Image: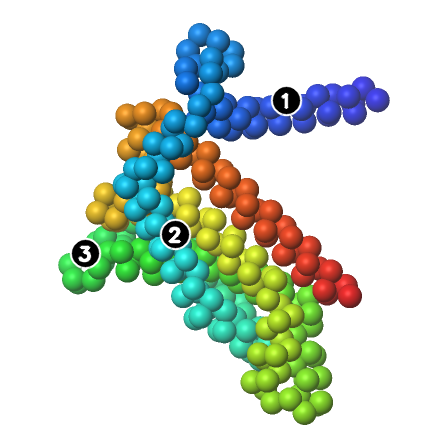
Amino acid sequence: MKKRGFADLFFLLLALYLVLPVVATMLYAFATKWNKTILPEGLTFKWLATLFQDAEFIQAFGRSVLLSCGAVLVALLVIVPAIFVIVLYFPKYEKWIQVAVVMVYSFPGIILAVGLIRVYSKLGVSMILVVLGAYVIGILPYIYQGTRNSLRNVDARQLLDAAQILGASKFQAFTKILLPTVYPGLFAGALLSFSVLFGEFVLINLVVGSRFETVQIYLMKKLSTSGHIASAVVFIYIVLMGLLTFTIAKLTKQSKGATNG
């Protein structure tokens, strides 16, 4: 009993340590003043209203969404079909994808940014496109795991064979049988990839910087000018990530339910 009580106390302290900074930041986004009291002296929506009236924030938010969605879309159109073919028909080559996944994790953002600048800065290639390509490779682990798990959960090879035995062509079996079955898992992987890219700062800041200001760069700039505005940005980011996490959880549960059914 004593050990269990100690474990519960440790878990509670750990939860407070992790949650309190987030809660304090969210409260500061609505605080009128918070200097000498434990809780804010008043609450207001002024900072959020100011933020959404700032054209720079709207543009930065749009750039983040555009860049993240663009990378995810390219990955879905290019990487996912390649993973489908390799996992279903050439499983012996899957080890090379796994090597690529490990290599993605092994490159720190700063080293990658310096390498991209040295290679592409003199070639006349837009550095935004370079970052987009790096993002596509960067989300390979999430796209690969989501696709691979979805295919393994439904036993995709047998599903395709059964559809073809019943008279469907390979294209019909792929588009009308396999894709609808694995769609929740693919969509969950896409949302996870989007959430990772939306919060990325090191690569876009070092390679492009203020020439293509995203939400994270905008947040860094506001940290030195207005703590309330910066907290409002963090609040919006937390809400967005919470919605994405909830959606991913629902889709994962739906995918497991469809598999068990």
Query: On the rendered structure, is 251 left or right of 243?
Result: right
Q: Looking at numbered disc 2 in the image, what kind of residue is underneath it?
A: Val
The answer to which image quadrant residue 219 occupies is top left
The answer to which image quadrant residue 56 occupies is top left
Mark 3 surroundings: few (<14), some (14-19) or many (≥20) residues within 10 A = some
* Image point (48%, 9%), residue name: 37
Does dot 1 land on a helix, a strand or a loop? helix
| Residue 13 marker | 1
Q: Looking at numbered disc 3 in the image, what kind of residue is underneath it?
A: Ser
The answer to whether any part of residue 218 appears in the image is no
Does dot 2 land on a helix, a strand or a loop? helix
The answer to whether any part of residue 183 appears in the image is yes
Q: Earlier in the sequence, mark 2 or mark 1?
A: 1
What is the x, y in percent for residue 86?
54, 75
Alpha carbon separation for disc pair 3 and 1: 48 Å
- The residue where tag 3 is placed is 121
Q: Nearer the viewer, mark 2 or mark 3?
A: 2
Of residues 65 and 82, the one nearer the viewer is 65
Q: Earlier in the sequence, mark 3 or mark 1?
A: 1
Of residues 65 and 94, the one nearer the viewer is 65
